[in-house]
Image: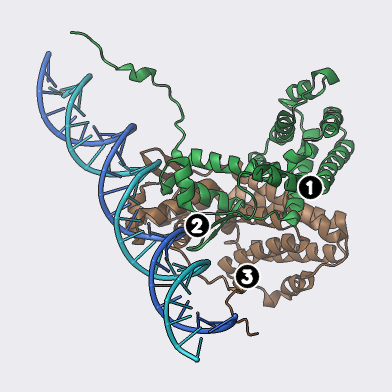
Chain colours: A brown, B green, C cyan, D blue
Amino acid sequence: MMTRTSTAMQEVVIAPEPSLAETAYAQIKASLFDFELLPGDRFSETEVAARLKMSRTPVRDALYRLEREGYLRVHLRVGWSVRPFDFKSFEDFYDLRLILEEASVTKLCEMPEREGLDALAAQWLVPATDRIADSRDASALDEAFHMQLVAIAGNVEVARFHREVTERIRIIRRLDFTQRHRIEATYEEHGKILRAIMRRRVEEANRLLRSHIIASKAEVRKITMHRLYTARSAQHA
Amino acid sequence: MMTRTSTAMQEVVIAPEPSLAETAYAQIKASLFDFELLPGDRFSETEVAARLKMSRTPVRDALYRLEREGYLRVHLRVGWSVRPFDFKSFEDFYDLRLILEEASVTKLCEMPEREGLDALAAQWLVPATDRIADSRDASALDEAFHMQLVAIAGNVEVARFHREVTERIRIIRRLDFTQRHRIEATYEEHGKILRAIMRRRVEEANRLLRSHIIASKAEVRKITMHRLYTARSAQHA
DNA sequence: TCCGAATTGCTTGTATGCAAGAAGGTATAC
DNA sequence: GTATACCTTCTTGCATACAAGCAATTCGGA
């Protein structure tokens, strides 16, 4: 009985079909992260649709998604605008991130099986010569470290929310890594955190993590205004 | 010159006119919570649009929003379906909720000013005769307690995410409150937690909160299958 | 020159039209 | 009776058309 029926619905690979709405979302988000769209900027759906060479429909989908995520604001029958930077909000996001990661680290120290932890260690416990120097790459790698830490802890929903938080502060965190010594420090701190986790030192791991994130938060607080202004100037040049 | 002008424009209430998309969202969500739409059910945009007496556009907005929130799934050119219950996912949500509330309670115990805490106490530290008995009301009040606890802690973003988590598990949590003794227990436990917070007993407050939420989680785990089945049967009757 | 009111253009929200593709039923070959 | 291929119907994704309302602009008047 050759049931070559295509009833293998569940096996059907989720074809990488990027819908227009999806690409619009990615494009606009990239514009935000690259400061092509600056906080306070106003624009209309028609404008974006023309620029992306598609109709308003997928653009609207993308815009509303970004609005719900906190990046944009819509004004009824007036237009769209980029949410201005709210530093209180960024501080809150940093604290939220810390909360989620502390919980994950605590759990990690208590878990019997911690699949993927070794791989993470292999990536970070490396000699100084093997370290990434590029700002953009370092930023991405740093994000990956924290996200994997949470992922290994095994709570899918925590990981989902943590990812959202991470994305939300990416725009400001990236500015942090433009400084070389911050990259060095990140490697050091990540290494220490990992070692503490592997030795199941809950207190120590949490203390290190906390100071690591608080340091990052403080750095961002210092440089933000200046860097943002630079970014804006560069844009206008 | 009969000024029969209907220029009562200024009297027009500045009602925050709920858009069709918004009402569609609320309606569909209500259908989900009332088990009119059951896990696994399939339907099309046209169906919903006809039922809600509007076009597909606002319905689509609502459906996509619910899809991103985890309630629905969309199958390309096939139709929509209600996400089946994933109990692992609900457990994860409960743990996430606990993480956020523990962090909030800890912060509450350390904060100098805690505006709103007294009001909360006035609501919960009441004699047994003044207590709500209705299942639906009790459920809503319970939600409000936890959300206000987080809100008073002052982190807006934590509150936003916590709210989302709360909404996500509402559908299952409500089943818990159909049992009278669960309502009683909730009053007792909330009272204890509040008293501990007011006396700034961090450890105690967290311990109470943890056992409160874990108990709730356990209760839900016990009754879920049966209740869901009941709800489904009642629907089909 | 200054001020006010009508108007016109532009904006979003909603409805509708169209096309590619999937699912299931039906007819046909064997 | 069984399996296969076609075909009809229905689905979403996207494009376009229309409606209601805000805001700037322009025109008129003093």
Is the C-beta separation of discs 2 and 1 under 8 Å? no
Separation of marks 1 and 3 at Cα, in angstroms = 28 Å
Is the C-beta separation of discs 2 and 3 under 8 Å? no
Q: Residue at x 38, y 17 (%)?
A: B11
Separation of marks 2 and 3 at Cα, in angstroms = 36 Å
Q: Nearer the viewer, residue A42 or B209?
A: B209
Q: Is residue A11 left or right of residue A149?
A: left
| Res B226 label | 1
Q: Residue at x 60, y 48 (%)?
A: A222
- Which quadrant holds the N terminus of chain A? bottom right
User: Disc 3 on helix, strand or loop?
Assistant: helix
Classify 10 Å Cα crowding around label 3: few (below 14), some (14-19), many (20 and above): few
Amino acid type shown at disc 3: Gln
Is the C-beta separation of discs 1 and 3 under 8 Å? no
Q: Quadrant of residue D24?
A: top left
User: Disc 1 on helix, strand or loop?
Assistant: helix
Q: Is residue A37 left or right of residue C1?
A: right
Q: Quadrant of residue B53?
A: top left
Kindly identify which residue carries mark 3: A10
- Which quadrant holds the C terminus of chain A? bottom left
Specify the subunit that label 2 lies on: A
Name the front one of labels 1 and 3. Answer: 1
Kindly identify which residue carries mark 2: A33
Classify 10 Å Cα crowding around label 1: few (below 14), some (14-19), many (20 and above): few
Q: Residue at x 81, y 49 (%)?
A: B221
Q: Residue at x 73, y 76 (%)?
A: A127
Residue A60 in sight from this viewpoint? yes
